Image: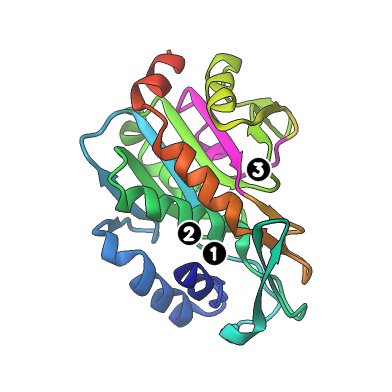
């Protein structure tokens, strides 16, 4: 949890590129990936296998300053670790939760390609850049899973009314993760890959009231989701995506 608390102690907006790059250097660059021309950070763990995971590195905030670590509060509630700020600004669990989970998957050598997208909160600019400029590269993937959805239960099958993945694929994830299918997803980075990657989805990762000063996160849920994803056989994803 200490690293997670450090990660949410940084506001990461386009208005403060120095703080953003400091955060990237501390938490993501040690993973050994590469930046593309836009600033998305890409890590391939193991041999390419048609599976893509994504999260976004930027956060929403009305200020550009670094959050002091003592303004982040941890509470124990019903045997769960809950995290929030002092109410003066958003926590940034959207999408620090997703980044933390993917970072740990890489550290555990889960085989997949991982994209940490830049500028999702500005309109999915990082993923739009990839979709426009690297369609041949994207064609190798059958599955694109974002970890960027509020709550506990959702495996997204539709974003803003557009079907983004098959029910067969979504049910495979839902059954393994103890979640349910949801047709009411908003837009996240994997939406920009619809039509280029056959199955694009978004998974709940335990944050609530995003983009507000009352945002909070269930860090225990992040740990539980991580453990379930690490136990998910890549071949199960590949078969369900056909």
Q: Which residues are magenta?
A: 185-205
Name the residue beneath numbered marker 3.
187
Residue, x 36% and y 74% (percent of image)?
26
Q: Secondary structure at mark 3?
A: loop
Residue, x 42% and y 12% (percent of image)?
242
Q: Is residue 14 above or below residue 180?
A: below
Q: CA distance from mark 2 to mark 1?
A: 6 Å
Q: CA distance from mark 2 to mark 3?
A: 15 Å
Q: Residue 147: percent from the left, percent from the top?
A: 54, 45
Q: Residues within 10 Å of mark 3 (few under 14, many from 20)?
A: some
Q: Residues within 10 Å of mark 2 (few under 14, many from 20)?
A: many
Magenta span contains residue 194: yes
Q: For residue 64, which quarter of the picture?
A: bottom right
- Work out whether mark 2 precedes mark 3 in sequence or the reverse, and give the earlier one: 2
Q: Residues within 10 Å of mark 1 (few under 14, many from 20)?
A: many
Outermost residue on the front side: it is: 79
Image mark for residue 191: none
Q: Residue 199: percent from the left, percent from the top?
A: 50, 25
Name the one closer to the observer, 106 or 51. 106
Q: Residue 33: percent from the left, percent from the top?
A: 27, 56
Residue, x 60% and y 83% (percent of image)?
67
Q: Secondary structure at mark 1?
A: loop
Q: Residue 13: percent from the left, percent from the top?
A: 56, 72
- Work out whether mark 2 precedes mark 1 in sequence or the reverse, and give the earlier one: 1
Q: Is residue 219 above or below residue 17?
A: above
Name the residue beneath numbered marker 2.
118
Name the residue beneath numbered marker 1.
58
Name the one closer to the observer, 15 or 239. 239
Residue 124 visible in the shown view: no
């Amino acid at each position: 949890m200490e690293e997670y608390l450090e990660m949410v102690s940084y506001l990461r907006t386009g208005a403060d590129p120095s703080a953003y790059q400091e955060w990237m250097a501390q938490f993501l660059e040690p993973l050994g990936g590469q930046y593309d021309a836009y600033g998305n950070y890409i890590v391939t763990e193991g041999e390419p296998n048609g599976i893509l995971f994504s999260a976004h590195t930027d956060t929403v905030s009305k200020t550009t300053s670094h959050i002091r670590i003592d303004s982040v509060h941890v509470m124990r509630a019903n045997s769960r670790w809950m995290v929030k700020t002092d109410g003066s600004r958003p926590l940034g669990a959207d999408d620090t939760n997703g980044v933390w989970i993917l970072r740990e998957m890489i550290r555990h050598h889960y085989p997949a390609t991982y994209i940490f997208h830049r500028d999702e909160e500005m309109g999915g600019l990082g993923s739009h850049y990839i979709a426009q400029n690297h369609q041949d590269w994207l064609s190798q993937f059958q599955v694109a899973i974002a970890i960027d959805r509020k709550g506990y239960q959702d495996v997204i099958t539709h974003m803003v009314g557009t079907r983004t993945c098959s029910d067969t694929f979504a049910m495979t994830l839902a059954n393994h993760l103890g979640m349910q299918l949801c047709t009411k997803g908003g837009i996240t980075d994997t939406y920009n890959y619809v039509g280029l990657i056959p199955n694009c989805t978004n998974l709940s990762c335990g944050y609530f009231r995003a983009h507000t000063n009352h945002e909070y996160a269930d860090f225990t849920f992040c740990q539980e989701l991580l453990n379930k994803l690490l136990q998910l056989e890549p071949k199960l994803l590949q078969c369900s995506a056909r």
